[in-house]
Amino acid sequence: MDIKRVKDYFYWLYFQYLLITCSYVLEPWEQSMFHTITVTVFAMVLYTAYVFIPIHVRLAFEFFSQMFGGQPESTV
Amino acid sequence: IHHIVQNGGLYKKPFNEAFEETPMLVAVLTYVGYGVLTLFGYLRDFLRQWKIEKCQNATEREEQKDFVPLYQDFENFYNRNLYMRIRDSWNRPICSVPGAKVDVIERVSHDYNWTFTYTGRVIKDVINMGSYNYLGFAQNNGACQEAAAEVLSQYGAGVCSTRQEMGNLDKHEELEKLVARFLGVESAMTYGMGFATNSMNIPALVGKGCLILSDELNHASLVLGARLSGATIRIFKHNNMQSLEKLLKDAIVHGQPRTRRPWKKILILVEGIYSMEGSIVRLPEVIALKKKYKSYLYLDEAHSIGALGPTGRGVVEYFGLNPEDVDVLMGTFTKSFGAAGGYIGGKKELIDYLRTHSHSAVYATSLSPPVVQQIITSMKCIMGEDGTTLGKACVQQLAENTRYFRRRLKEMGFIIYGNEDSPVVPLMLYMPAKIGAFGREMLKRNIGVVVVGFPATPIIESRARFCLSAAHTKEILDTALKEISEVGDLLQLKYSRHRLVPLLDRPFDETTYEETED
């Protein structure tokens, strides 16, 4: 019963995505093209975030701690 | 919610009109949706031009391709690429009388709405929330139908002539006297078509050298009549009396554009109920302005006659004003009386002038006799002259239905435009995909609604328009409300950010707005 509710909820979310981006009114081949482009763009955004965000966060943390602390970290 | 304060004694009861603002996120997402559709529209047009896909709309033949183009393809861009995709929500054929419930013929399309085929099935007893059947006179049984059938057997169906030649029946004279008595004016004249009443009579009343001040959201018939007349047209903001007063002052002070002569006539064109917004005109203020600046008023009561006012005499009675203050009272018989045609009422000199100078009177065929009898019977029923209280009960039932329906929809959290007392209820949808989805989902649940998009409304403000009727009982309305709430949850339509605390049937006064939670 719970699995059915979860599946219904995900289907409802998919339906909302179709309505907001107006792919509900497109023909099936247009919908496939639109979904491919959206998924590709979204995957590229995720990959960029995965590659760049940890490094930038670490560099920003080091910059601010140098500014406020003023002591170089020991390498031991 | 824009709270309107009572205006110093001109209004005898509170005037509650609200047009909630579009939420910012919804507006942005609507534009995103239209952007996606535009891109796909360009793609499909490109495929159609390069013959990769078959072009199914009208084009010239091969031999005519070198001539001046006959079809302007870009202007129909919206038509081809959005309207066609959701076209199955409009032009649905019905096969029974459009009362509280109607039978709809089922159609299916195999090539994405370019062509339709009938499946052979009829969807029975669809709750009808789209017909302008305000007092429930669209019936195929009862006193109106019997009287009309008798007149049909006596006079036949066709008149075969215009009013000025041989088409002036005694039934028409009887109807005109009755209409004048109903409205409280000296004299009235009736025409065969409501649209033609406006578009053919405004040119007879004003001409070059006159000024027309028309509301922003006036109906196409008023706009057409104003343009045909050749007078100068100035537009004031919808129901905005400051804008109207500024235009009147400028007109009186500056006169005609180049010669600075005074205008021959100034005519203000307003409607009783605006059917796309559900708003009611601020008639007391318009009449006060008209008297102050000595101009004339043309009031189009197409939707408000029969639907407003304690005895159904329209917007003039709703505000408790004198019908002699309005110079030209126009209305139609299509909506509340269940017939066809239009009328104009006013002073006797005006109507006698129109009898000879109106284009409709000279060239258009007069009303058909059974239709005239339907109007006579229904009007007598509303006035109470047929001996029953059916008319008064219908008017009261409509007012109750209106208040109940609007209150319940607002409590559910939908954005509803317009005045609290207008039987036309626009429910905002905003996103283009939801227009088609709403129409289809409601028909699946056996409710027929009218959805409206661009160009009848501004591009992001698409809506579903419900027309209430005295023929709807409370059970029908409850069923409809339950389904609307379900579809609203499914499509996420409950945008309203002002949650009104549900009232316990208190009279609607200003203090109830203090209970609003933001």
Image (cartoon, coloured by chain):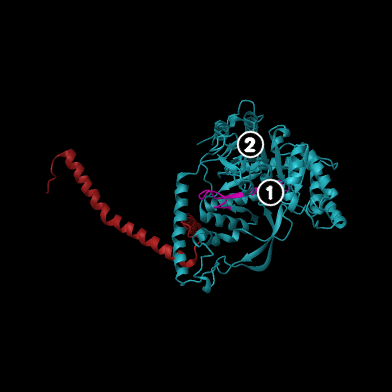
Chain colours: A red, B cyan
Residue B45: percent from left, percent from top = 47, 65
Residue sitting at x 73%, y 36%: B310
Q: Which residue is mark 2?
A: B264
Residue sitting at x 68%, y 33%: B319
- Residue B388's place in the image compared with B3, above or below, is below
Magenta residues, dominant SS class: loop
- Residue B166's place in the image compared with B293, above or below, is below
Residue sitting at x 76%, y 54%: B365
Residue B250 figure quarter: top right
- What's the residue type where badge 2 is placed? Lys
Residue A38: percent from left, percent from top = 39, 60
- The residue segment tinted magenta is B452-473
* Count of marks, rendered view: 2
Q: Residue furthest bottom?
A: B63
Q: Which quadrant of the figure contains the N terminus of chain B?
A: top right
Both on one chain, marks 1 and 2? yes
- Is there any visible trace of residue A7 in the rendered image? yes
Residue B5 sits inside the magenta stretch: no
Residue B406 figure quarter: top right
Decide which of B82, B175 is in the foreground and name it: B175
Which of label 1 and label 2 is nearer to you? 2
Q: Which dot marks residue B52? A: none
Per the image, label 1 sits on a secondary structure element best described as helix
Q: Which residue is mark 1?
A: B200
Other-residue count near label 1 (Cα within 10 Å), few / some / many at <14 / 14–19 / ≥20: many
- Is there any visible trace of residue B472 in the rendered image? no
- Proximity of marks 1 and 2: CB atoms separated by less than 8 Å: no
Q: Residue furthest top?
A: B8
Side (left or right) of B440 relative to B184: left
Residue B189: percent from left, percent from top = 76, 44
Per the image, label 2 sits on a secondary structure element best described as loop
Please, which chain is the residue tagged with disc 2 on? B
